[in-house]
Image: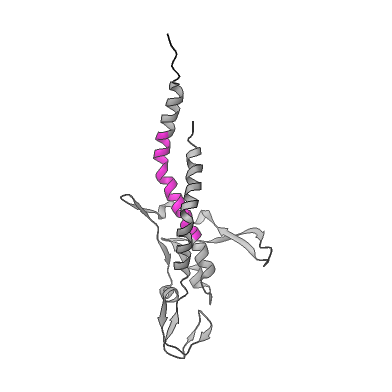
Amino acid sequence: MAKSGFNFKQYERWAKNLHVATEEFELFLKQFLLEMAQRCIAKTKKRTPVDTGALRNSWSIGSQKIELRGTGKFNKKTGHELVEIDPDKSDVASILVVGNTMYVEIYNSMEYSLYVEKGHSQEPGRYVPAIGKTLKRDWVEGKFMLTISIDEIRQQIPARFSKAFKEFIKRYEV
């Protein structure tokens, strides 16, 4: 009688791993999307002009406030401490799933955040705290701190997703 090269135990392990991976894939996607949103907020905070700091500190994912914490490492050129997002301050509950689409809301609770982002009109000669100047013109240009950050993250997503997905799949290899 000829022996088959089929290993049923290996097939069973593969099938079980496939089932677990399928169940955990949505969580993986949510975690990935949350990480991209956190990166976007970190970039946005760096670009946000500071007068009192309220605008910069009001960025959040949905209703969850994002906070940065020191890493204990320093930039060699500037001497400034490097920061990272505190992962304990947000979770995947902020990710909304509608059908086959996942959404994450990046939000700023300050009433004037849209005006700083997109620009606004003003009375000529009025002092603008966000830029520390008195302008003579009617239009104050926007800073586009969120728009630019979203564009940068959007360009990084394919490479970052590919790397994260390969790591995810490795956990389930037989």
Residue 64 drawn in magenta: no
Q: Is residue 2 left or right of residue 81?
A: left
Asked where in the image residue 16 lies, by quadrant, the reply is top left
Residue in the image at 42% along x and 65% along y: 107
Asked where in the image residue 15 lies, by quadrant, the reply is top left
Residue in the image at 41% along x and 80% along y: 120
What kind of secondary structure does the magenta stretch mostly adopt?
Answer: helix
Viewer-nearest residue: 23 or 68: 23
Q: Position of residue 130 (x, y in %)?
A: 50, 79
Residue in the image at 42% along x and 50% along y: 30
Q: Position of residue 53 (x, y in %)?
A: 53, 73
Asked if one can make out residue 82 in the rendered structure from this viewpoint, the answer is yes
The magenta region covers 18-39
Residue 16 higher or lower than 30, as above or below:
above
Q: Quadrant of the N terminus?
A: top left
Q: Position of residue 42 (x, y in %)?
A: 52, 62
Name the residue at the left extreme: 99
Q: Is residue 93 left or right of residue 73?
A: left
